[in-house]
Image (cartoon, rainbow, N blue to C red):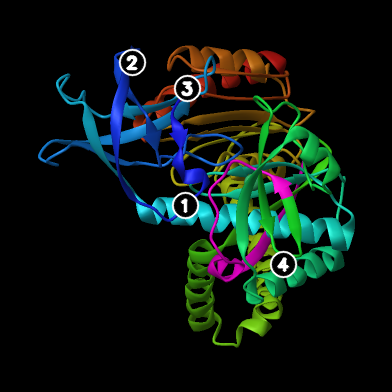
């Protein structure tokens, strides 16, 4: 089994090891070494990346994944390209920025988990660390804003006190006598690795940690979510907290330039803008309705009169279907009105509507017209609407003229 050297020194980034086995699976190749500083994905912490090279470091390949073989706990270093079979010794190099980021987040998690336990009596059920988020799931459905602030404050005090973080191995019997925050359900063999934050937190953990709490830099809770009925705390530490602060600062500066106020005034500023926008929208809507009413009266005045009935046909461009509906509503308030309206364009729209006292089957008339442009629609004898394939003004005018002829015939037969 590979010796896990990262357990006892998380700061070592270069090492030499002997190749003890080569593994091929799913078109990928992996090496098992007698000892390694590469951390494998486990316990909520992602794997390390880096390189493995021959002894002269003339031939290096990237380590793209690191996993634990379930049967025997061997650590598999998955390679971007296979390494020459003659190579018996390799030089390993760990990608330090990625590793240190994981150390900052993981140590920060231990501190925050203990702080949540002390301030809110909230125990950590699970921890998850990925490239874009760090989360703790708690055994509580909810936390108050005051509890979050208390936990965050205590956690950062522990960071500033720069307490040592150490790891040691104990037997399961020894572990049972200690006041551990968390004991794993099943530990392989009799050995258990403990991580201790001096005078604050003691827990079973296999992860990589900073040597002193001060290296965590800052612990900031950014969000409280609910996952499957449990509270989930989203937070960030160290360089991630700085990146988060930086991004928020940039956003605030940009907002400040737009709103020309101090950031504390942003909520009021935005509420003011929302109110103005609502008032403006109301005004536009009212004026649009007035305009449509006027337009309807103009169309009515241009209508063709056949005895008691008036036929209005018109083809529009640059309008919306809803506006045609409003126009038809205005028109059909007149006794004897029949309105045949069409909207040309990519999505043509036809609306045939009549007053209750006018003759004609609007649905039948519409189906006839739509059949010619492969369209779909429906309605009643009084009003019907639908659309079809793209049609221009001239095409729709032809359709409306044909429908008009049918209407005039109906009027003649009803008189
Ligand atoms: Zn841990």
Residue 194 drawn in magenta: no
Residue 395 in the image, given as x and y percentages of width and height: 37, 26
Closer to the eye: label 4 or 3: 4
- Give the residues in magenta: 203-227
Picture layout, residue 284 above or below residue 382: below
Q: Which residue is mark 1?
A: 10
In-front residue for pair 161/46: 161
The circle on residue 173 is: none
Q: Which residue is mark 3?
A: 388
Q: Residue at x 68, y 55 (%)?
A: 196
Q: Residue at x 33, y 15 (%)?
A: 23
In-front residue for pair 414/89: 89
Give the class, few, some or many, for how many residues have Cα within 10 Å of label 4's Cα (few <14, many ≥20): many
Asked if one can make out residue 216 in the rendered structure from this viewpoint, the answer is yes
Mark 3 and mark 1: Cα distance apart in space: 67 Å
Q: Quadrant of the C terminus?
A: top right
Ligand 1 neighbours mark 1 (CB distance < 8 Å): no
Q: Quadrant of residue 43?
A: top right
Mark 2 and mark 4: Cα distance apart in space: 43 Å
Left or right: 387 in relation to 287: left
Upstream in sequence: badge 1 or badge 2: 1
Upstream in sequence: badge 4 or badge 3: 4
Q: Secondary structure beneath disc 2?
A: strand
Picture layout, residue 273 above or below residue 230: below
Q: Secondary structure beneath disc 4?
A: helix
Residue 133 in the image, given as x and y percentages of width and height: 57, 49
Q: Which residue is mark 4?
A: 155
Q: Which residue is mark 2?
A: 23
Give the class, few, some or many, for how many residues have Cα within 10 Å of label 1's Cα (few <14, many ≥20): some
């Amino acid at each position: 089994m590979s010796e896990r050297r990262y357990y006892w020194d998380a700061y070592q980034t270069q090492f030499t090891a002997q190749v003890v086995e080569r593994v091929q699976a799913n078109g990928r190749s992996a090496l098992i070494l007698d000892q390694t500083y590469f951390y494998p994905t486990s316990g909520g912490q992602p794997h390390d990346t880096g390189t493995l090279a021959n002894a002269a470091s003339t031939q290096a390949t990237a380590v793209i994944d690191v996993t634990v073989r379930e049967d025997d706990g061997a650590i598999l270093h998955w390679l971007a390209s296979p390494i020459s079979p003659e190579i018996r010794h390799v030089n390993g190099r760990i990608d330090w920025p990625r590793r240190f980021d994981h150390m900052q987040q993981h140590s920060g998690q231990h501190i925050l988990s203990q702080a949540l336990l002390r301030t809110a009596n909230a125990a950590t059920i699970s921890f998850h660390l990925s490239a874009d988020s760090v989360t703790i799931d708690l055994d509580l459905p909810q936390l108050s804003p005051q509890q979050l602030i208390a936990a965050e404050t205590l956690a950062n005090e522990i960071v500033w006190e720069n307490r040592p973080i150490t790891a040691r191995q104990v037997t399961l019997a020894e572990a049972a006598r200690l006041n551990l925050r968390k004991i794993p359900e099943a530990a392989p063999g009799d050995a258990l690795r403990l991580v201790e934050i001096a005078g604050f937190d003691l827990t079973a953990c296999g992860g990589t940690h900073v040597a002193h709490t001060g290296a965590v830099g800052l612990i900031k809770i950014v969000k409280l979510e609910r996952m499957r009925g449990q509270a989930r705390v989203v937070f960030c530490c160290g360089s991630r907290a700085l990146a988060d602060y930086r991004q928020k600062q940039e956003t605030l500066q940009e907002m400040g330039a737009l709103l020309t106020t101090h950031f504390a005034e942003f909520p009021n500023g935005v509420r003011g803008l929302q109110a103005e926008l609502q008032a403006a929208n109301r005004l536009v809507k009212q004026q649009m309705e007035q305009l449509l009413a006027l337009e309807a009266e103009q169309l009515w005045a241009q209508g063709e009169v056949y005895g008691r009935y008036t036929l209005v046909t018109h083809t529009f461009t640059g309008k919306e279907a809803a506006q045609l509906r409003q126009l038809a509503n205005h028109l059909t308030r007149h006794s004897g009105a029949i309105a045949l309206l069409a909207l040309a364009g990519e999505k043509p729209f036809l609306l045939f509507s009549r007053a209750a006292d006018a003759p004609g089957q609007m649905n039948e008339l519409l189906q006839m017209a739509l059949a010619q442009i492969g369209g779909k629609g429906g309605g009643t004898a009084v009003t019907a609407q639908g659309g079809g394939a793209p049609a221009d003004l001239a095409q729709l005018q032809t359709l409306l003229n044909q429908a008009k002829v049918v209407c005039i015939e109906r009027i003649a037969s009803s008189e």
